[in-house]
Image: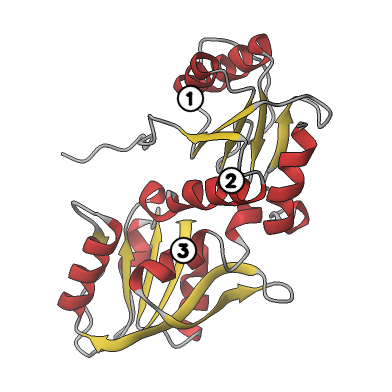
Amino acid sequence: MKVKDIIRVIEEFAPLSLQEGWDNSGLCIGSPEDVVSSVLLGLDCTPVLVDEAIACGADMIVTHHPLIFSGLKKISPDNPVGEAVIKAIKAGISIYAAHTSADKVIAGVSGAMAARLGLEDVQILDEDGEGTGLGVVGNLPEPLSAEEAVKLVKKSFGLKAMRASKPVDGKISRVAMCGGSGGSLIGTAMKSGAQLYISGDISYHNFFTREGFMIMDIGHYESEIEIVDILFSLIKKNFPTFAVRITQNIYSNPIFYF
């Protein structure tokens, strides 16, 4: 098995051409021709994840968030990115990220969010091609009050807490959502007819919403974590006997709730 074989399967699901211009999805360490005997999956490529790959004998890491996101001016063990890069190169570990490429397919991050809530008639929220784009929008099986929607979202995503705007007075029947940092799609969510928009990393001023529209910030990590299972199932389905595993340190969320 070669790195390019794993990449082919991932990119058939989430083509690299779909990624946003600011993104850095794809192979950031290693060669497509490198031989790979085992893959380790996680959301973030942290030094801890690289250590785990070394310990379990994985020679390829696949994550959602890119290890190298913007230009590196230096590679030093004094910061987490540099430390992970150095460890991976020393150990001969290839690293691949499916970031906005996996965000923009309906079976990816946002589609998984919609499935957790049981949304029906799900469509891309901000379409940029034939059935691809950021976010999704769909309908609840039955309208819910704001209080009922809060309970459903917290239960569905396993949340201890969330941030939300002022609850709407009427029923919520249509819901838009985007995994990760989705503040830029608030206007698009309103235009879609949604009464509720769910995402992460929403800034303070965006919580001043218009009447009849509500925002829930469930957290960046919490909205995206299911992509790890999706990528695992994808690789396992195509290579049933291949050694692929999900990190034992799956909770890489840098945000702590007290």
Read off the residue under disc 1. Answer: 49
The image shows residue 75, relative to residue 255, as above or below, that is above
Q: Position of residue 37 (x, y in %)?
A: 67, 26
- Asked whether 41 or 179 is in front, the reply is 41
Q: Position of residue 141 (x, y in %)?
A: 33, 86
Residue type, numbered disc 2: Lys
Badge 2 or badge 1: first in the primary sequence: 1
Can you identify the residue that label 3 sits on? 112
Question: Quick check: 173 left or right of 63?
Answer: left
Q: Is residue 92 above or below residue 229?
A: above
Q: Nearer the viewer, residue 47 or 230?
A: 230
Residue drawn at x 19%, y 54% is: 161
Going by the numbered disc 3, the residue's amino acid type is: Ala
Query: Which numbered disc covers residue 236?
Result: 2
Q: Is residue 108 left or right of residue 220?
A: right
How far apart, in angstroms, are the residues tagged by discs 2 and 3? 18 Å
Contact flag, marks 2 and 3 (Cβ < 8 Å):
no
